[in-house]
Amino acid sequence: MQNVGEGPAGFEKLLRRLSENAIVRTVAGLSVERVTRIQTEGATRDFTELVKERLVQELEHLNTGVTVVNVEAKTIQPGRVRDAFLKVSDAKSERKEKETQARQEAHRILSKTAGPRSKYEQLLEAINTYGAAQNPEADDRRLEELRQEIDRQLDQAEGEVAVRLRQAQSRANEIRERVQQEYKLFVDYRDMYEQYPELTLVRLWVRMRDAILSSTDNEVFFVPEAGEIEIITNRDVQRQIEAEVQRYRGRK
């Protein structure tokens, strides 16, 4: 030590004065949240670091040869506002807990939806990139590339996305096969009609009649030759049961 006395006892008073001065001058320029060490938006440094820097400058200016290793502070809330400080601290802890729970829940939902983090993050990035690129001046070729990237990520996804895509693909195959069969049948009837028009009409009429009579949605009434006919409009209960059974099997 230089210029401060012969031992620590002689330096203590000076250090206390310099520390108090550094604390007052530092605290005067900070908000109460920074002083009570409650992290706020934009608060990247603890105020004890600022106190340490100011104290070091003062000691160097006096050429004391003393090095400040660390500055520690303990927050003591004033009695009258202690409850308010505690509520702020509790709210901060609760916010962190809620944020942690929200991140965990988001991870659970996304993992269930699209698979591991590495896959759902890439899928979300592709979707967000495509959304950000959509504007009136957007290049159609660029948008098409982004859509293809989304499709590529969907093909690699797991979880419910993969299940839904397989179901959609299966349904699309069923529809495509049915349409192809209907188109082939139409072509066959068209070619047949060009060669045998009357026979083709008869076959089409028979096909339509069979479709009507075999449908569970239709009921057939045989009307006798009589001057007065009484028609009971109540549906056949047995036919209703058969229709319900058929619809149930179709859903399964």
Image (cartoon, grey):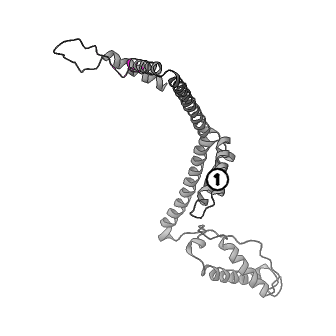
Nearest the viewer among 137 and 73 is 137
x then y, percent, for residue 90: 53, 59
The N terminus sits in image quarter = bottom right
Q: Residue at x 52, y 60 (%)?
A: 91
Image quadrant where residue 3 sits: bottom right
Tell me if mark 1 has few (under 14), some (14-19) or many (20+) residues whose alpha carbon lies within 10 angstroms of its own: few
Predominant secondary structure, magenta span:
loop
Q: Residue at x 58, y 48 (%)?
A: 106
Q: Secondary structure at mark 1?
A: helix
Q: Residue at x 79, y 84 (%)?
A: 60
In the picture, measured across the screen, residue 80 lies left or right of residue 149, that is left
Nearest the viewer among 140 and 103 is 140
Q: Can you identify the residue that label 1 sits on?
A: 144
Q: Is residue 226 above or below residue 128?
A: above
Image quadrant where residue 208 sits: top left
x then y, percent, for residue 42: 62, 71
In the picture, measured across the screen, residue 229 lies left or right of residue 188, that is left
x then y, percent, for residue 184: 56, 27
x then y, percent, for residue 61: 78, 87
Task: Provide the residue span drawn in magenta.
Answer: 211-222
In the image, farthest residue toward the left: 228
Nearest the viewer among 40 and 55 is 40
Whether 111 is among the magenta residues is no
Task: Identify the amino acid type marked 1.
Answer: Glu
